[in-house]
Amino acid sequence: HLQQVDMCSFSSHGQLVHFGFSAMFGFGGQSLARAEKKRWMSSSRRREYALVKTLAKLRPEECQLSFLPAEKSNHSLFGHQDQDQEKVKDSKSEVEDSWRTNQGLYLNISIMSIPCLSPHAPQGLAPNTSLANGSASLTAVGNASRSEFIKHLKRYSSSSGQFSFPFVETHAVSAVKIRPCSLTGCFEEESEEEGDSKNTPIIQSEEAAFPWNIDGELVEIAREVHIRIHPRLITLYGEEVDEAESTVTCSCI
């Protein structure tokens, strides 16, 4: 019952910041930051408050997103990658040329090295990955209207369709870099200015930090973040978790 599991490392400007299995930047980080400011509430009420508040003030983040596609040989279900790791070591120059870079407005970016099953997402937030396949699932949600974004979120509670929107793209990756274009900070929490998310990026304040949701923990980082996937980094005692049988509907959306 020993299970090897992939893990991610998060670093900024060459310094290790965190290890984790999943991370969300944008909507996921902003909603967690709002929830942390209401610790006096019950956990369920705090979660719904943060979700509704962040949806009401929905704004895209303008950033540069770079990712290194995972090699096809890395997609083995059981993560047998000793030979693949040797190939990567022998082809660093080729790997450097394989980075893909996009710049634009994003509502949410998630990187997950495990499926992240939950009652709200029976098949997981990242159903296209597994515990030890040597890659992570990158989901980039581009700029869209509030109503379309809510439809995307609701699809996670059903069997499929959350990635079928034209503003959502997914990739199997071995590394990701996220560089906010302003490099100066996160949303203004108490701003009362409303509006749709179509073309209005968040206005940043000097020297503030961007909120990240890493495994449910709020981590604030002010600079570019480099995420690397480490295949089978740790070994856990247990078995692979089957699809959750029950579903929970969030009353707030």
Image (tube, rainbow, N blue to C red):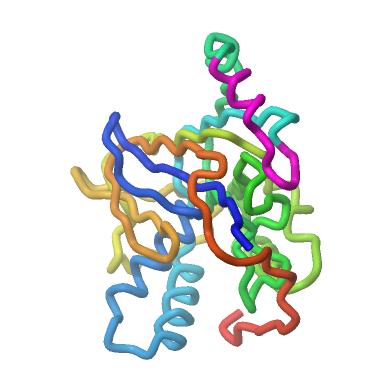
User: x, y (%) of residue 152?
Assistant: 68, 62
Q: Answer whether residue 194 is visible to the viewer in this image.
A: no
- 85 falls in the magenta region: yes
Residue in the image at 27% along x and 43% along y: 222
For this orientation, the residue located farthest to the left is 207
Residue drawn at (64%, 30%), measured in percent from left and top?
A: 69
Q: Is residue 76 left or right of residue 239?
A: right
The furthest residue to the top: 93
- Left or right, 84 with respect to 202, comes to right
From this view, report whether residue 213 is shown above or below residue 79: below
**Residue 151 on image: x %, y %:** 70, 67
Q: What residue range appears in magenta?
A: 75-89
Residue 211 found in image quarter: bottom left
Q: Nearer the viewer, residue 97 or 146?
A: 97
Q: Residue at x 45, y 51 (%)?
A: 25
Residue 30 shows in this picture: yes
Q: Quadrant of the C terminus?
A: bottom right
Q: Which quarter of the image is occupied by the N terminus? A: bottom right
Picture quarter containing residue 90?
A: top right
Look at the image and say whether residue 84 sits in the magenta stretch: yes
Residue at (72% x, 66% y) in the render? 123
